[in-house]
Amino acid sequence: MPALATDQVVHHVEDPVEEVEASPGRRLGFLGWFSLVWLGGVALAALAAPWLPLPDPDRSVLEIVRVGPIQPGHPLGGDGNGRDVLARVVFGARASLGISVSAVGLGFVVGGTLGLAAGYFRGAVDGVLTTLFNVLLSIPALVLALALVAVFASAQQDASNGRKMVVLILALGIVTVPLIGRIARASTMSWSEREFVKAAEVLGAGHLRIMVREVLPNVLPAMVSIALLGVAVAIVAEGSLALLGVGVTEVPSWGNMIASGRSDLARAPHIVAVPSIATFLTVLALNYLGDVVRARFDVREAAL
Amino acid sequence: MALARELAKRALGLCLVLFLVTLFTALLLSMVPGDPVDTLVPLAESEQADAMKAQVRADLQLDRPLHERYLGWLGDFVTGDERGEHFGDYYRVSGRDPVSGRLAEALPISLQLMAYAQVLALAVAIPLGVLTAYRAGSAFDKATNVGAFALLAIPNFVLGLALAYYVGVWLSWLPPSGYVAFGDDPGEHVRRMVLPAVTLAAAQVAVYMRLLRSDMVATLQEDFIQMARSKGISDQRVLWRHALRPSSLTLLTVAGLNVGTLIGGAVVVEVIYSIPGMGLAISQAIFERQYVALQSFVAVLAILYVLVNFAVDVLYTVVDPRIRHARARN
């Protein structure tokens, strides 16, 4: 494999920013800690939402219709229907994060397995799987998700909320499969040529054992760094789909809060601003941590 | 010789991908749960509705086996149906309405928007990438890096809504929505395309800048740069004439492959700014349950994207002598 051998001769590049911000062994830094704390807080709030001392996110109170932040009992004000914005943004995290994390989880398992198999077995298996990835990648991701959700969830007038959520997760998951699959394949290819893999082969280890015990642990960092970016992309995609009118509607999500607040932008910009800021900080944190993982484990994008 | 074989191999792969993509989009409608005809024609029981449903059944050949249906669709798509229409119809109360007219209007508008965004993104990202690589580690570099992270994290619809409202409505500097063709009024055309193009370009600037910067940092440590510097060539000239070209290959590839992201972004941006491009056409088709039209739009975008990817791939092979020779050797 002459092509691969050259790939592994990686020129060491001194990059001041990477050295400072994410060199292995260094501290995480302010932005890193901020990202971890924010994501942890959001995840915790999303999980614990029903038990938190919050008003009912669906109950309308006439007094707080389009009323701005810092109100007694309603720290972030009310939306166009007089519903508490804080409660909705916390419950919205459940839908937004739930959908994106499940979708990327699905893509992670399916794409990771396929990519590992493609990179390990090569030959015909690789050919078939790479073609599959290319086909999935050849439809612009948002358009593919939009088409799938439109066809499967809004085709019937009575598409229930649960059904919409499952379709959203599947659609966004399918979009993630080739992204994670490709990086897993490339990473597997470079690792499965190493001496310790050959050694395991010589010792008589089976394919499955080598793939799971020898190759997978080395491929995981690359997959995790892409998956973190994937969750960020999925959160934005959920918002985009909501804005295009095919997202979940019965429960609050960050996307549908922004979509429904559009018409009140002039009178009450906080209705759009609150979920927008939540989305922004979450995406920022995920992107940053993805970058840290990539720098720390020296994931080479050139391997793509 | 080897290059020709490589290209032939790629062209074969292209055909396979095109086949599978069109197969997927052609059969999208068959995947609709329940009877797709009832979904397409959501009219009450009437003679008109029955006639329309019969028409839909005939058009879509739903009683035929899968492969015949695909071939039928492909035939219509490539050579046109009995009326010479390539992209199927909208099924409206008033009767069939060809999709091709809408497509002919929408596609150029979207391509325009994407081209503006791409040019704008590269025009901002290339100087920033070069300067941050030249001054790597400086306060300017670090501030730009943080700025790029922030820019990447702003969802395009949030940026779009914010710009449309604050720049378009509150400050009233630019019109917040609508489209005017260049031919009708060039000045107004530009004024209306500024905000959408900026919205679409913002995240790309961050991506391109970071890419170019990291490649430039690597290039600037190469021996031939030392050589050029030691000959007394000015920093400006070394940066722009010697270092930029070998550093820009990844950037150009990514800019090419990014067309998919741009298409997705354009869908959202067009809806926010009411620009009658493919995005608005697709979201209207979904809203009106016009799945035949949706199918054609998705197929056209996918084919376009596949062809762009192919072109980028071929160009990459032809342009970079290192890759050309590496492939020729193997």
Image (cartoon, rainbow, N blue to C red):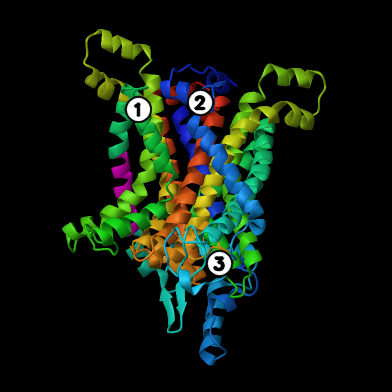
Q: What amino acid is labelled 1 in the image?
A: Asp
Q: Residue A82's spot in the image, x, y percent?
A: 49, 70
Magenta stretch: includes residue B121? yes
Q: Which residue is mark 1?
A: B141
Residue A124 in the magenta stretch? The answer is no
Specify the subunit that label 3 lies on.
Answer: A
Instruction: Tell me which chain the residue with mark 2 is part of.
Output: A
Q: Percent position (x, y) of residue B174?
A: 23, 58
Q: Residue furthest bottom?
A: B47
Mark 2 neighbour class, 10 Å CA radius: few under 14, some 14 to 19, many 20 or more: many
In the rendering, at what x and y percent does residue A285 appear?
Answer: 51, 40
Q: Which residue is mark 2?
A: A22
Quarter of the image with the N terminus of chain A is: top right
In this picture, residue A208 sits left or right of residue B126: right
- Secondary structure beneath dot 1 equals helix
Residue occupying the point 54% across, 53% down: B21
